[in-house]
Amino acid sequence: MSFLSVRNVSKYYGPVAAVDSFGLDVEKGEFISLLGPSGCGKTTTLQMVAGLVRPSAGTIMMGERDITHLPPPQRELGVVFQSYALFPHMTVAENVSFGLEMRKVAKAERDRRVKDILALVHLLALADRYPREMSGGQRQRVAIARALVINPPVLLLDEPLSNLDAQLREEMQFELRRIQQVVGITTIMVTHDQSEALSISDRVVVMEQGRITQVDTPYELYERPRNPFISSFVGKSNFLAATAEHHAGGATISIGNTGITFQANDRPKGKHVSVFIRPEKLRLTAPSEGQIEGTVTSRYFMGNQWLVSAKTPAGTLSVAVQNFGAPPPPIGEKVGLVWRNDDCRVLAAGAAE
Amino acid sequence: MQRNGPVALIFHSLVVAFMLAPMVVVCLVAFTPENTLTMPWNSLSLRWFEAVFEHADFMASFWNSVRLALLSATISTFLAVPAALAITRYEFRGRDALNALFLSPLIIPHLVLGVAFLRLFSLMGATGSFAWLVATHAIVVSPYTLRLILASLTSMDRNAENAARTLGAGEWTVFCRITMPLLLPGISGGWLLAFINSFDELTMSIFVTSPSTVTLPVRMYMYASESIDPMMAAVSALMIAVATVTMIVLDRMFGLDRLLVGKG
Ligand SMILES: Nc1ncnc2c1ncn2[C@@H]1O[C@H](COP(=O)(O)OP(=O)(O)OP(=O)(O)O)[C@@H](O)[C@H]1O
Ligand SMILES: [Mg+2]
């Protein structure tokens, strides 16, 4: 019996399904990310777990208990809203203390816990400010503190870090993860930032148009995305049109216009397939030494790496080159591209190319 | 914002002057030492203000109006809060009708309302009762309270209430601790507007007041139809002062443009 179990939950707005048969079992202490493009139903899913949106179908279980129709106050979950939803007429300290008041925690104890949690999110100095007197990032941290302070068994975060600058964001990501692990709090976080999802989650749930399309550990998700959409949504990808000859042990893949063939273990449906390979799995060499030859068409410097595009007979390929040694060849130069066929994934040809 | 050209500027100044001039003149005339409505060119006097304060009927009417405005504004606020909540938050049959009903006193001429109430009260045998006068005023001012409360409800972040729920607050606690405080600007703004409107309502009140419940505007109307002396100017100046002070309070507390131009 898993700790939190969402079973076949759907939400219809009129005839349109905002969430369609969402099913997920979450273990105690697990950190789950809901990842997907805008409007795919992430917030709706989270709010159904929180009890703020009534599911049209399905059940939500917490251990042995069916909480599908339990009102939010009895669920005792910590929720961080996408819009923060701070109480504008209360100071930061009062906002954070609200949940403790509802739990009838004594004043002295309340003050101590509020102080501790505000220190944790680096907001102790602003305890007496009102939300309108703070920046977006600061408000977001108040919202996190307010949800954490009640020590909920489950934490539901709706894009909790979307408004922080890059550095604070990274700091808070690891901080969130640290708190989550120290307290052992089961967490579901909504995000549309793939790197955030990959870096701090135990498992990532990818949603498209109200449906789950893949649930996996970050590494598996990145290495073995189930469809072209996921492979381009999670990280960058190159797609090559190819054909597949199916046989008993797998398939023989021929990449279009190149004469390159290789054996694949993946078994996509149909004859026309997409071969996808990550930019960092390609390497540049001298023109004659590569599997394929190309001409550099653009070269961007990203700090830790270069992103080089090369036009080849199979299409334009992006190559990530570590910023190590001399810069990669300039635009117009002929290059060779090398990869291991094992690093190629073969997917049924999809729309997301 | 576009800058106004000189012609527009002159035009606007003239409009403002045209609107303000009568009030300025009335306030000045109130300080005349003469027995007629003349400008106090030579000396100022407070004798007409004294006259007002010594005039028992006027003072009785003044307090009558104050009581009436306080009560009707408060009653209409108590009705408008649940009505506004129902209108913005629930889908039910007759919702638009309820909304229209609450706003109808703005559209129906007060003269018609006055005649209708007069007829109704004489049928009921309730003519001249202060309680029924309060009821009529509560009806007439309710569009103001409802409008302002609706405006602050529609601009309110419902997730703040949801956040309180997830933190363990029951519905009643949410209402007292979150909803009401967030509605307060709308409620107090609506209340003040209702107060002002009740305080200077004349047309309908002429029909529904009795000798014992004469309001200040009705008293002035009756007095002015017999004789015009500078005491009328003094009373007017006092009323302008009351309205101005309320408006300033309103503006200080919430910002008038936000309340009256308001969102929603
Ligand atoms: N109250 C509602 N009435 C009708 N449709 C709704 C309602 N709430 C959400 N939807 C629709 O349901 C779908 C999912 O919305 P949701 O807010 O869950 O998306 P999301 O994944 O959180 O997007 P974002 O990343 O932009 O926050 C959207 O298409 C939205 O238009
Ligand atoms: Mg959302």
Image (cartoon, coloured by chain):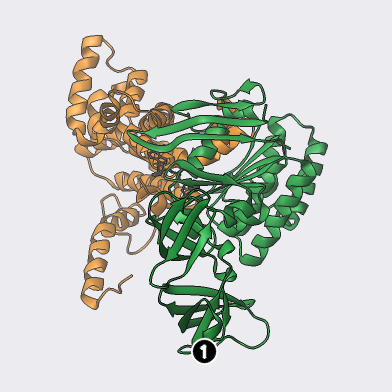
Chain colours: A green, B orange
Q: Quadrant of residue A351?
A: bottom left
Rendered position, B236 above or below A103: below
* x then y, percent, for residue A121: 72, 54
Q: Split into 4 quadrants, where in the image is the C terminus of chain B?
A: top left
User: As drawn, is A312 to the left or to the right of A104?
Assistant: left
The residue under label 1 is: A330
Left or right of A36: which side holds B4? Answer: left
Q: Quadrant of residue B45?
A: bottom left
Left or right of residue B26: residue A253 = right
**Chain to which mark 1 belongs:** A
How far across and how far down the image is residue B6, in percent?
A: 24, 77
Q: Residue furthest front?
A: A248
Residue B234 is situated, as x and y percent measured from the top left of the image, at 35, 47
Ligand 1's image quarter is: top left
Q: Residue at x 27, y 45 (%)?
A: B229
* Residue closer to the observer: A116 or A127: A116
Q: Is residue A91 visible?
A: no
Query: Three-letter amino acid code at disc 1?
Result: Pro
How far across and down, in percent of the image, does residue B177 sit? Answer: 59, 34
Q: Residues within 10 Å of mark 1 (few under 14, many from 20)?
A: few
* Residue plotted at (25% across, 27% down): B97
Please say if B256 is above or below A154.
below
Is residue A196 rendered to the left or right of residue A316? right
Nearest the viewer among B224 and A268 is A268
Mark 1 secondary-structure assignment:
loop
Say if residue A343 shows up in the picture: yes
Along the viewing direction, whichever of A132 and A256 lies nearer the viewer: A256
Q: Is residue A102 above or below residue B185?
A: above
